[in-house]
Each structure stands twice: as C-alpha cells, then as structure tokens.
Image: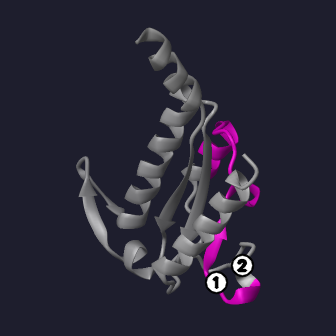
Amino acid sequence: KIEGSREKMAWRGKEAIVLLVDVGSTMCGQRVAVGGAEASRADVALGMARNIAQQKMLFMPKHDVGIVFFGTTGTCNDLQADGYDNVSVACGGTLGSPDLAMLRFLTQRPEGGAESDAVNGLIVALDSMIKKTRDQ
C-alpha cells in the first residue's frame, strides 16, 4: 500500500490554474465593507487572487498560475483578433510558477470599469490553459 501511495504522489506533481478576475464596471462601482474600511468589489477579488498566488508561491512553487482580467479598458490577449475585447492576460500572457513579480502585479488593479462578458474571459483563460498544458 505504501508503494501505491507513492505512485499517486508522483503523478500529482504539478498543477496549473488560471485566476479569472472581474474588474468591470459593476465590480469597480460597488463598494463593500472590508475590515472596517470600504473597498470596491474588484479590489476584494484582486486581494483574493493575490492570496491564492501567494499561497501557491510559498507552498506549491512548482505549480503554474495564470491571471486573466476581464472588464479592463484595454485588451491584451491572443484572441483579441477574434473579438475577445476588454480581456487582458497578465504576466506576459503565459502561465508560470508564481513569483514576486506576479505578486507585485496583483497589488495594482489594472485599468478597469469597462463592460465585458465573463464568458469571453473564460474562453481566454481556457485558451491560455490549453496552450500551456497541450504538450505536457
């Protein structure tokens, strides 16, 4: 039984996740109380994404993390020619091991407040995931 559990551990060696963060007009416009202060819902979501990336960096540094924002005023993704506007892929558009640069990036909210469809963000996130994991 011990050998069987070792095989399972070796198989589960690496994970890849993409964090999809809404920074659109609805999330930027609504304020919520957080720890005695007010913050936009987008800032709260960004803080949650930062916490996930931080935990991955500290406890699972071999896992890959990607970040996709939808509702941004700009567009930066591989599918923008196909009409996936107001969706931006962070950190050079690739999934990679979480590092301090990623955490620094997550401390500043991208220029948001635009209208965007969550499905567009999801499609761009899936495209990033497929490109990263296709050959592994």
Q: Nearer the viewer, residue 12 or 86?
A: 12
Is residue 34 left or right of 115 when viewed as pictured? left
Above/below status of 98 relative to 128: above
Residue at 53% across, 77% down: 71
Q: CA distance from mark 1 to mark 2?
A: 6 Å
Image quadrant assignment for residue 26: bottom left
Question: 70 or 133, which is in the foreground?
Answer: 133
Residue sitting at x 25%, y 47%: 35
Give the labeled residue for mark 1: 84
Q: Residue furthest bottom?
A: 83
Quadrant containing the C terminus in the rendered view: top right
Circle 2 SS class: loop
Q: Residue 134 location in percent, x, y?
A: 72, 56
Lower sequence index among marks 1 and 2:
2
The amino acid on which the numbered mark 2 sits, given as a three-letter code, is Leu
Q: Which quarter of the picture shows residue 77?
A: bottom right
Residue drawn at x 37%, y 65% as measured from the top left = 40
To which residue does mark 2 refer?
A: 79
Magenta residues, start to end: 81-105
Question: At which x and y percent is residue 4?
Answer: 47, 18
Q: Hey, what amino acid is under mark 1? A: Tyr
Determine whether the residue tagged by mark 1 lies in a helix, strand or loop: loop
Residue 59 is marked as none
In this orientation, does residue 94 appear?
Answer: no
Q: Are marks 1 and 2 in contact (CB under 8 Å)?
A: yes
